[in-house]
Image (cartoon, coloured by chain):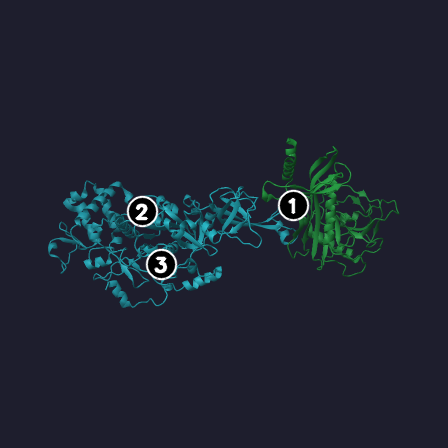
Amino acid sequence: MRIRLDPWPVDTFDGQLTLSPFAGLVFNAEMDRWAALPTRGVPERVRRVLVVDGKPRMEARLLLDDEAGTLSVAGFGAFVVGAVDLCPHGTRRAELQGVAARRVLAYSGDARLEAARLSPRNPHSGRLEYDPHPFSGAQVEGARSKIQRLMLDAEQQMSADLASPLPLDETDPDALPDTLVLQDGPVRIGEAGRAVVGYVKTLHTDYLGADRIGLLTELKPGERTPILRFTLGDRGEGGEGGREQRFTWYVRLCEAPFYQHPLAGVMRLEMHAPEDSEFVPRGVQDIADLSGALLCRLASQPHKDPRAPQNLIPTAALEQAMGRAMGSPELVTRRIRAHLAQEYGRAVGA
Amino acid sequence: MVLGTEDATPVTFWFAVSPGASVQLDDLVVVQTRKPDGVPVRFYGIVDSVRTRHEGVTFDSDVQDVVAGLLPASVSYAARVLVTRVNPENFIPPQPGDEVRHARGDDLHMALSADKMKDAAFPGGLLADGQVLPLNYRFVNGENGGHINISGISGVATKTSYALFLLHSIFRSGVMGTRAHAGRALIFNVKGEDLLFLDQPNREVQATEDGVRAAKNLPRGRYDLLGLPMTPFRDVQFLAPPRPGGLGGGVILPNVEQRSSGVTPFVFSLREFCTGRMLPYAFADRDASLNLGFVIGSIEDRLSRLAQGDDAPYLTVEDWKPDTDVILDENVRFGELGEARIETFAQLVSYLEYKLLEENEGEGDRRWVGKQSPATLQAFIRRLRGVQKHLSPLIRGDLSAEQTRLFRPDILREGVQTSVVDIHKLGSHAQMFVVGVLLRDLFEYKERMGRKDTVFVVLDELNKYAPREGDSPIKDVLLDIAERGRSLGIILIGAQQTASEVERRIVSNAAIRVVGRLDLAEAERPEYRFLPQSFRARAGILQPGTMLVSQPDVPNPVLVNYPFPAWATRWDEVAGEVGQQVEDAGKDWLGL
C-alpha cells in the first residue's frame, strides 16, 4: 500500500483526490496526437497581464419585520473585486487595481429599503454604506447567494473591461492581444470575444478519461496538453448542445513531490470557443503556448502559500488586499450592532 | 498622517510619509489635532527614526517577487517623532490621520521654543535643512543657567571647534547687546598649536563653505544663514610659557613653533608664587595624605609671610646660604647685603628643604615644621622636587621687575577680548598649575567684581582637571566655577572625551550639553541619558562638524552642523603673508 498526500490544506473544501467524469463529449481541437507540448515563452507583445479575483463576505444576517407583521430575511454583506496589474516580463512593479469594498444590504420581499449608513464614533475611521439589493425567494441563504452573485457579476464586468478583444479567427497572425486577463475559476457565460483565461486550481471534473489522464502525471513543469473543446453543460444526452463551447488545456506548474497526489501542481485553463468550429483560433493557441511560461512565473512557493503552486503569487496578494479592503469583521459587526441599537433603541425605549 | 497602527502618544508618535515627500532624521515637524470641543492642539517634534518597509507582504523573500513585478506591495515610509512641545499644554494624544507637516517659520520657532527666547537667542548651528537652531543665551550667561559641556572622541568630535564657534556666535551675533565688548574669553590651548591663529583669517574657509553650500543646496552661505560674520576673532592675546632655558640675558621667548609673532610669554615671579599662595597648585594630587595637606597649607602660609613687604621678583632670606655663589652685580640693593637671594624655583625648593629637614641638625625650623613627622616633610620635598623641572621655567626670580610686570599673564587686560593660553607644551603638572592659578585668580577677581561682565572659560580635557575620583585644588576651583561661577559671571565651556570620567557636579551644572562623535560604549553610560536611545546610537556615527545639542528649552536634543572655522587653525591655513619679519618677531618677544 502506498500513501499519497492531498496537496491542498485540509480545510479546503473538497481537496484534490477524486475526479468525477465529464458526461459530455470532449473533442481534440488542436491535434489528434495526445502528447505534451512545451511552452513557447511569453512573447514581447504581451505587455500586461491582469489577475482578476473577487471575494464575498457575509457580515450579518437580519430578520426584517414590517408593520404588517410579515417576516423576511436579509443580510449585511460586502464584496470586493480587484485585479493585479503586472507585466509578464517584469519591467515594472505589480499594482493593485480597483480593490475597493462594496457593501450590500441584500433583502427578500418587495419592500423598498433605504441604504443604511453606519457612521463611526471616530471621524477618521470612515463610514459604512450598505446599498440595498433585493433578491427573490425567502431562503435564509438567499442573502449570501445574492452577494456572491453580485461579486461574480462585478468580477466578470471587470474582466471584460480590462481584457483586450480577441478575434476568434483561425489564422490572423496578430491575434495575440497585448493585455491578457487571468480570472479565477472557469470563464463565464457572455465573456466571449475577449482575452480572458479562466484558471481552475483544483481538478474535480475529468474531461480526459482514463486513457488520456496519464499524460497529466507525465507533464514537466511548463508543459501543457493539447487544447480540447467541449460544450458547457453537456450531459451526454446528445443534441442538447446549444450552450457555449469552451477550449480547455492543462498546464503543470511544478514537479509534484513523489509523496503527493499525482495531479498536484496541475491547473486547468479554459477559454471561450466559437460556436461549432473545428479549428482553434490563432489567439487561443498563442495564449495556450505562453500559458506554461506565464504560470510558472506566477506560481507560488509551498513554504509561503499552503495552496502553492496553483494559488498564484498575485492572487494571494490580491486576496489579502481584498480581505483588508473589507475591514476587520469584528469591528464591522460591532458597528452594525451599534448602528441598530442607535436606530431603534429610542423607539424600543419609548 | 499620524499612523493608526502604532501608538500615538503626546510624547511620541509615528506618521506615514506621503508618496513624493521626504523626511529625514532631525526634521522638525508639526501636527495639529482638535479636541472634541474644537480647540486645536499643536504638537511640535523632531524626527528621531525613519523607516521604509513593504507592507502587505509576509516574507522577507517577497521583496524578490515585488521587484520582479509579480507581487503587488506598497512601500510604507514612516517616521517617528519625539515631541518637543505641545501648545497649548493639553497632553492629549494626536489622532491617527492627523496631518503632519514640516515645521517652518513660526512653527519652527515654536518647535525650538525660540518664542520663549526672544532676543536672548543666538545661533547654535544649522539644522539639516539649513534652518538656524537658536540657543537661549539666558541659559548660557548665568541668568537662568550657565555653562556648556561638550563630550566626544578626540579628533572626530571637533569639540574645541564647536566651543569656539559658540564663542564666536555669542560675541558676534549681538546677543550680548551693548555689553558685547565686555564679554571676555579665556581659552586654554591643550593640543597642538591649533588655537594660536584665532585672529588670522582662514584661507580655506571660503572654498569650503562654498562647497558645502553647493553640496547641501543651501540658499546662502552658512555664515550668512547664521547671521554671523565670516571673520576671525578680534582682540586676541596669545600667552605661551617661556622656552626652557631661554636665550640668557633675561630674554624670555614664548615656547611656540608655528607662530612667530604676537605671542606673549608668561611667567610668574617667585614672589607672586609666594604671595599669591600658588603652592597648592603645584601639587596635583593633594589627596595623597591628610598630613601632606597640612604641610602644604602651613608652608603656603609661611612663604606668603616671607614674601610680604617687597615687590622684587625674587625673595631674599637671611638664614640660608645657597650652594651656588650669588654673583653680586649692580642690581644688588643695599638692604640685601648679607642676605641670600632666591632667584629660581630650584633654590626655593632647596631653601624649603633646608628649613624643613636640615636646619638645627635635621630638626628643621620649628615654626616651619609645625609638628609634622619627618616622613611627611620628606614626602613634601620629594613631590616638590618632582615638579621642580616643570615649574622652573614658569616661576622665575631672575627677571627684572619690569619684565615680570610685562610677562605677568593678565587675561583681563584692557582691549583684549579673548585670551588664548597655550599650555600644550607644558608637562602635566605645569598644565595643572597654570590652569589652576589662572582660574583661581579669575574666580577671586570676579568674586570681588561681581557678574557684570561675563567671562567664558574654554577648557578641554576636563577629565584631567576635574576627574570623578580624587581631589585636587584645580578640581576645587572648577567645582567652584561650576556651582557658583554662574552667579559670578564665569561661564565654563568645558569639554572632555568621556563625561563619565568627569566630576558629576561639573557636568550636571552645565545647562547646555553638546555631544559629538561618541564611543558607543561611552554613549550608554548614565551621563548621556539626556539623549534618547536613537540619538545615543547615532552619536557613534556623527561626522566632524556635526553635534547633538541639548538645551533646557527644548526637551530633545537637536542635531546641528556648524560652519568651517573662519579663523585659521593651522599655520598653513593662515591667509595672506603672515611671515612677519624676524626682527619684528624678535622685538615682540623682547617686549620692545
Task: Pick the residue in front: B335 or B318.
Answer: B335
Asked if residue A56 is positioned above or below residue A31 in the image, the reply reads above
Give amino acid for label 1: Ala
* Residue projecting furthest to the front: A350
State the image quarter where residue B343 is shown.
bottom left
Q: Find out whether the residues at labels 3 and 1 contact each other: C-beta distance under 8 Å.
A: no
Query: CA separation, marks 3 and 2?
Result: 31 Å
> What colour do you see for chain A?
green
Task: Pick the residue in front: B97 or B542.
Answer: B97
Q: Secondary structure at mark 3?
A: helix
Could you tell me which chain the residue with mark 3 belongs to? B
Q: Find out whether the residues at labels 3 and 2 contact each other: C-beta distance under 8 Å.
A: no
Give amino acid for label 3: Asp
* Residue projecting furthest to the top: A349
Going from the N terminus, do you reach mark 3 or mark 2 first?
A: 3
Q: Secondary structure at mark 1?
A: helix
Asked if residue A93 is positioned above or below residue A136 in the image, the reply reads below
- Which residue is labeled 1 in the image? A325
Query: CA separation, marks 2 and 1?
Result: 65 Å
Residue B7, position as x, y percentages in the image:
54, 42
- Which residue is labeled 2 in the image? B487
Give amino acid for label 2: Ser
Q: Find out whether the residues at labels 2 and 1 contact each other: C-beta distance under 8 Å.
A: no
Callouts 2 and 1 on one subunit: no
- Which residue is labeled 3 in the image? B194
**Rendered image: mark on residue A287:** none
Residue A143, position as x, y percentages in the image:
73, 39
Query: CA separation, marks 3 and 1?
Result: 65 Å
